[in-house]
Amino acid sequence: MSRAVPSVAPGAEPAWWLLEAPPDEAAPALEGEAVADVAVVGGGYTGLWTALALKARDPSIDVAVLESEFCGFGPSGRNGGFLETYWPALARLHDRLGAKGALRVARASEGVVGAVRELGEDVWLRETGMLLVSASAAQDSAVEHAVEIAVQLGVGEEGVPLSGEELARRVHSPRFRRGIYFRKAGTVQPARLVRALRRKAIAAGVRVHEGTRMTRVRPGLVEVEQGRLRAAEIVVATNAWASGWRPLSRLLTAFGSYVVLTEPVPELLEEVGWTGGEAIADARLFLHYCRTTPDGRVLMGSASGPIGFGGRIGARFTEDAATVARAERGLRELLPALAGARVEHAWGGPVDVSADHLPLFGTVPGARIHFGAGYTGNGVGPSWLGGQILASLVLGADDEWASLPLVLRRVRRLPPRTVNFLGGSLVRAAMLSVEESVEAGGRPAPGARFVASLPRRLGLTVGTR
């Protein structure tokens, strides 16, 4: 595993997205006693889309959003900005939900692009599609499987295979062997998007309270540090922080994901032919992901960060220099023509990884407390779908959203948190070692290969792809 020192240490400043996005005046904290029809805990994408969906269906509903820091403080303001529908995840959906379920979820997710357009604000939306690429022989099978499933389900147009030559016409890299193009995807500026959602929610009459940390939630009541909010319906939409909430603690694990961002290098992008703005991800278990910005910067991310212990979200998710070094190394190795691009920013954040790598939506038994979490690093687009689902659960609607197979499904539980942390850390280290050895043309150590195979032998899913 890499011990290189990154060009920029993470944690010294907020995510560049937050620095670039036009700021908003802070919303007041909740103090004392208050009442609402619906309390939404979490001011990220899922919470705000849920609030907007509720107000769109019934403008008279009194909705209050409670955010511990500021809207977009968590992953909604730090992610890579891939606006995906579920078509790029069709193979995963098929393997977990079957053919009919996969198609239902993928088709239901398409509405996010129009919904972002309808915000009417400049969130840097680029509807350029996404490329899943193979950067080593070991990754070929994942690309081939994605192609096979799209053809098998009769939607080959949603996952178009690209030969090495065809891929090079979109972006040239000596490491890219083949790929698949998903047309229904794009990129956004994440912080601009969350702030646009916040402004629209407030304009629709949603009460937003920032600096309002939840201390306890129980039926009909959300307790915060300086008061209490009574609400008949409660939605918990706290992303990775939900890994410490008892109803989800055995279904979610927090992993770290980190990115580096270069100076503007439009001339180098011209050199490699990456001028279409496509989002790109490779097929590693702990994937690399990259995209460009309108001024020609390149973001490269690595989803290989450390695993969390229970619900503790601390410095390991924002200050892990080793993962930043892997992200920077990924930039230089996957796109060697960009070797001269100076890295100017680096940051990280937690990712809520579910036990089967698909999000979970449901209602706590015996309570009107609903939840949505487990996007596994792909929440920018699917959080819109989550908002529609959660609004239906709040309203008790028996509709197309509440009946999706992502809702109330059985998921294999994770081991107890100490076992999950220690075992997950060991397996993560082994998997990284095996992948790095294979990509370097070497032969993985037998011990690392055996440990890396344990999740498959036990029927568990590890990694972020």
Image (spheres, rainbow, N blue to C red):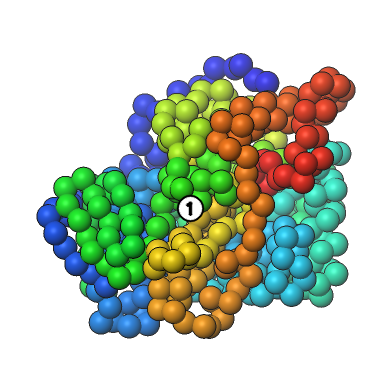
The picture quadrant where one finds residue 449 is top right
- Between 400 and 436, the one nearer to me in the picture: 400
- Between 198 and 57, the one nearer to me in the picture: 57
Residue 117 is left or right of residue 209, and the answer is: right
Residue 103 is left or right of residue 66, and the answer is: right
Residue 109 location (% of width, % of height): 58, 70
Query: Which residue is painted at 54% across and 28% down in the image?
Result: 324
Residue 159 location (% of width, % of height): 75, 64
Query: Which residue is painted at 27% across and 67% down in the image?
Result: 231
Residue 340 location (% of width, % of height): 59, 27
Q: Which residue is mark 1?
A: 247
Residue that sits furthest to the left in the current view: 32
Residue 319: in sight, yes or no?
Answer: yes
Query: Which residue is painted at 50% across and 29% down in the image?
Result: 343
Residue 206 is left or right of residue 391, and the answer is: left
| Quarter of the image that includes the N terminus | top right
- Between 419 and 30, the one nearer to me in the picture: 419
> Which amino acid, mark 1?
Pro
